[in-house]
Image (spheres, grey):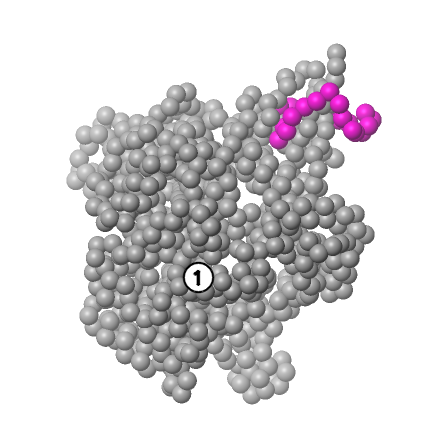
Amino acid sequence: MTRRYLHLALPSPLRQTFDYVLPARMALPPDGARVRVPFGRQEQIGICLGSSETTSIPEDKLRAATECLDEEPALPPALFRLCLWAAEYYQHPLGEVFDTALPVLLRQGEPVPAQGELRWRMTRLGELFPLDGPIRRAPRQIEALLKLREFPEGMIPPLLASLGIERPTLLAMEKKGLVECITLTPPTHETHVQGLREPPLPLNPAQALAVDAVNARAGQFHPFLLFGITGSGKTEVYLQAIAAVLARGDQALVLVPEIGLAPQTVARFRARFQAEIAVLHSGRNERERLDAWRAARSGRAGIVIGTRSAVFTPLARPGLIIVDEEHDLSFKQQEGFRYHARDLAVRRAQLENVPVLLGSATPALESLHNAREGRYELLELNIRAANATLPLFKLIDLRHQAMKEGFSEPLLQAIRATLAKGEQVLVFINRRGFAPVLMCHDCGWQAQCKRCDARPTVHRNPARLHCHHCGGETRPPVQCPSCGSTDLRGVGLGTERAEDFLQRAFPKVPLFRVDRDSTRRKEALNQLYHDIHAAEAGILVGTQMLAKGHHFPRVTLVALLDIDGGLFGADFRSAEHIAQLIIQVAGRAGRVGRQGLVLLQTRQPEHPLLRELIANGYAAFAERVLDERRALDLPPCGYLALLRAEAPDAERPMAFLNAVAALVEGDALQLWGPVPAPMEKRAGRFRAHLLLQGRRRPTLHAGLAALLPRIEALPEARRVRWSLDVDPQQIT
């Protein structure tokens, strides 16, 4: 009998596939199936790429596969091809790409289809039980009963948990006979829920045009860029486009940039649709994520909402892919497999043959360039929904101004006037903690992180010095280590310091701080947003978490305390990023029929970026920057890859990158560097960069494909930790 050999992709940093003998007892696995194999002294689970009767590996080096875990591919054909394409495009080991695409529990060997799905549903008693009876003082039980009455077929535990309905509540209700836990056989046929819980909102002409354009491309690949000013009703466009998808019996995948937006998006979608919604993001445990993944793969969930990695979620009947806030840097993975979820979403839509809708008030210049070149269809929303007006912009020149903890007197007057009207104020400062620097007032000594070229941030409650780059924490010194003085002061402004000052200045006004520190606990962010919406007059203080797509109807004044740092960044994308941030933060003001005001404190009031942005808007700013990028062959008019290297000493990364630079021949690739990274020392390791630039994408990728095997053969490559980032979004 002729021997067959399996070709597998294993989760390994090696850029190669692995051959194993197919045992006579094992059926030939289909491409895309998971196979358990011995690997070194352990076992690994890999993905089958195919089989053949020949191999280039000597027989004495070959080992037999242990077990085939799947009778059918773990990933459907389009996702399998997407992983193959992504590995080639990003020049990343294929096994690690497949590892990223699969939930952790599947990587550990759990079956792909559920053996039996657990669901909670009402009993007959629960259907008739009075809410003002014995459970009237148990609000969580009342909430659970109301939700289960909307879903008489039952709900899976992770979906209940996403609504704040936890297992102890359900167990208490089970004892009373109100609910029961049942096990369902996995679905073997297509099931759809098409109804709406609430009627759609009326659309203005631009919104209607956008919805009609997307619906007209059903069943075919077509990329759209929805360029809508803040508050223009992009979400309503998404909702009505998805309604048409569900009516056809298909599924929709919606990507959001961060966990913070997921609860708000899910709540809005649940209020509109009766369809089951699967939610995937890092805030959920592995069991919840696998359950949601299975609901999407089986076709039971009509809508899938998730963050970056949800782009790999399989759909039984794909109908539409949406990327909300498509410009956001959170869609770019910054470690390991450095993919961009927005770009993979477009490629996936092409493989699935469905339309893809990218939405933003401040589109990435890459997306605007694609629209200008005719690769994307541009849909514009230039009017705010519900007749809301755009906010007014004003600059506050800080030169010669008397300041109180980072606040100028004109800003404080505007805050007082806004609060007096019973409205809310949003204060934006993109720095967590109390102060960015701890300094000795007598000798000028400054606290320094021992592992980074950075200063640790001063935090209160508890008092600590925390480096936001390496995560290291220490207690603040009592005395200056340089001169012995006890006069140590926090210098600069962070969200905690702004909160302290505003609480003293406005002691009777509700104040809400929204940053990573105040939202660490599960459900803390949801509770904060609930409290903000319940309050009338109030002050919101926060970082970028406040800027991303959130709807605060009572906010009429937005204050940006310190934006000057972003005007002079070393990264060529700095201007684009600060412009997006300003517009996104400003977009929180005056969204529901009230005139909004945006105040920008700056010591650079004549800066051309600010003037262009305020006078002519983001579109005009983007056109000017695109022209500058074209002149310099920079993305999106040129193409980049960034080779990073790090080691415990400063010499090795530079020696490695110099050796790589010596391998590059001809002028197809232009080299920038090698140079030390902007922050050379981070987490105890020294870092260096080599930037490779190509005028054409095929030229860059061909050069990288030829270069990587030679890099791996360098002796210097074994002395450093190095990585390649294709299409880097931050040169840091």
Q: Is residue 57 highlighted in magenta? A: yes
The N terminus is located in which quarter? top right
Image position of 441 (left or right of 324):
right
Location of residue 146 by image quarter = top left
Q: Is residue 212 visible?
A: yes
Instruction: Return the residue found at the far top.
Output: 1
Q: Residue at x 64, y 62 (%)?
A: 683
Image position of 658 (left or right of 219):
right
Q: Residue at x 79, y 47 (%)?
A: 713
Which residues are the magenta region? 47-69
Residue on which disc 1 sits:
623
Image position of 241 (left or right of 200):
right
Q: Secondary structure at mark 1?
A: helix
Task: Please name whichever residue, 391 or 214, is drawn nearer the observer in this view of the structure.
Answer: 214
Image position of 109 (left or right of 134):
right
Looking at the image, residue 562 lies above or below residue 644: below
Q: Where residue 568 appears, x then y in whole percent?
A: 52, 72
Q: Is residue 550 visible?
A: no
Q: Residue at x 39, y 61 (%)?
A: 619
Location of residue 551 by image quarter = bottom left
